[in-house]
Image (tube, grey):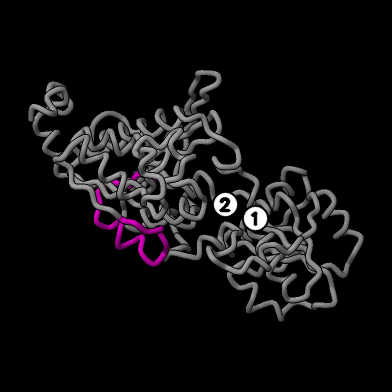
Amino acid sequence: MERYSRHTLLPEVGIEGQQKLLASRVAVVGAGGLGSPCSLYLAAAGVGTLGIIDGDVVDLSNLQRQVLHYESDIGRPKTVSAKRTLLNINPDVCVIEHQEILSSANVMDILGDYDVVVNGCDNFPTRYLINDACVMLEKPLVDASILRFEGQATVFMPGKGCYRCLFPEPPPPGSVPSCAEGGIIGALAGIMGTLQAIETVKVLLGIGEPLSGRLLLYNALRGEHRYVNRRRDPDCPVCGDHPTITELIDYHQFCGLPQPGAEPAEAELSIPELAPEEAYGELQRRAEVQLVDVREPWEYEKGHLPGARLIPLGEVEQRAGELDPSRPVFAVCARGGRSMKAAQKLKARGFEVTNIAEGTMGWINAGLPIES
């Protein structure tokens, strides 16, 4: 226990707590900007088993913030260099490499073996996938995200809300830049990833007040942080009182993105867009327009555009025959992402399609009429 003597001096940890850490299993999704500092401190803390999940290889541009990896690791799988570094920090730790990309096909088997899941991924399909899997597996999820000079973090405990309660729908494709597009100050990854490590230890030991029910927002430029209270949404489709999503879905489709490796033709189809006010004017003026709402039924029932026909995104291809190809189509969802994907599918089948930008949220914000 000499290695962990500074831990065992703490009454909140002690020898019993350290033994609990040594017996714990944590999955870290992503060996990148967040996963690097988080897994380093979890290994140093003596978390007995760390599962590192990443299907990527080390690139020179990673080294500015991904401190698990060295220049000599360029081109090497991140899980390989991560395991080497973590074992150099603490050879007592068992590091399991999952050199693969999480998907609906493998996520339950992989995450099911761990006590806590740490999310360090940088894309929305995987973020929603991890969330839904953790809800179904009843696993605590320690979540964080970073971009430019800003970070946010929270903890989703079983039964106390999930990522979908906070963000029911992903942003439209391309509306939120990745770190590769928007940039990231390297040290921010260290701050937020280390915060994830602290929150993980708190959850494992059952000490303190984890960030459950609170979202921490940090702005590095201003040197300030603030908290936003968050609550479980009883109408959440995954963790709500009457969940409608009880099995894993197609998360790329849900986020309005093409499947990895898919032919780019459909994704690259140019779709015209109208702001809510413009769309409303066109719908008032042109009776021939077919208005299609591609959200889920539970979303539609909460409120929809007057005259909108419900065809959920997952049913668009098989139900396209219900629409008249000689008449124009306006597609709408909550924020414009899923409807853009639906519009691409319909345009590929010869329809004249326009996407309503900002979706029903923009429609409501503009003070336009809604039916329920």
Q: Measured from the top left, where is residue 44 in percent x and y?
A: 22, 33
Q: Mark 1 falls on what kind of element?
A: helix
Which mark is drawn over residue 39? none
Q: In the rendered view, would you say 322 is above or below 367?
A: below
Tell me: 19 left or right of 325: left
| Residue under label 1 | 337
| Magenta highlight range | 98-119
Q: Is residue 60 magenta?
A: no
Residue drawn 65% across and 53% down? 334
User: In the rendered image, is residue 154 in sight?
Assistant: no
Q: Amino acid at mark 2?
A: Glu
> Is 304 drawn above or below residue 36 in the view shown?
below
Magenta span has 110?
Answer: yes
Name the residue at 59% across, 63% down: 258
Q: Tell me if mark 1 has few (under 14), some (14-19) or many (20+) residues whose alpha carbon lies within 10 angstroms of its own.
A: many
Q: Quadrant of residue 70?
A: top left
Q: Is residue 32 visible?
A: yes
- Identify the residue at horizontal 77%, vertical 52% (top origin): 369
Point out residue 159 in the picture as x, y percentages from the top left corner: 35, 48
* Pick the front one: 117 or 140: 117
Disc nearer the start of the sequence (1/2)? 2
| Amino acid under disc 1 | Gly
User: Residue beneath label 2, please?
Assistant: 169
Depth order, front residue of 280/171:
171
Q: Quadrant of residue 208?
A: top left
Point out the image quarter for the N terminus: top left
Per the image, label 2 sits on a secondary structure element best described as: loop
Depth order, front residue of 123/363: 123
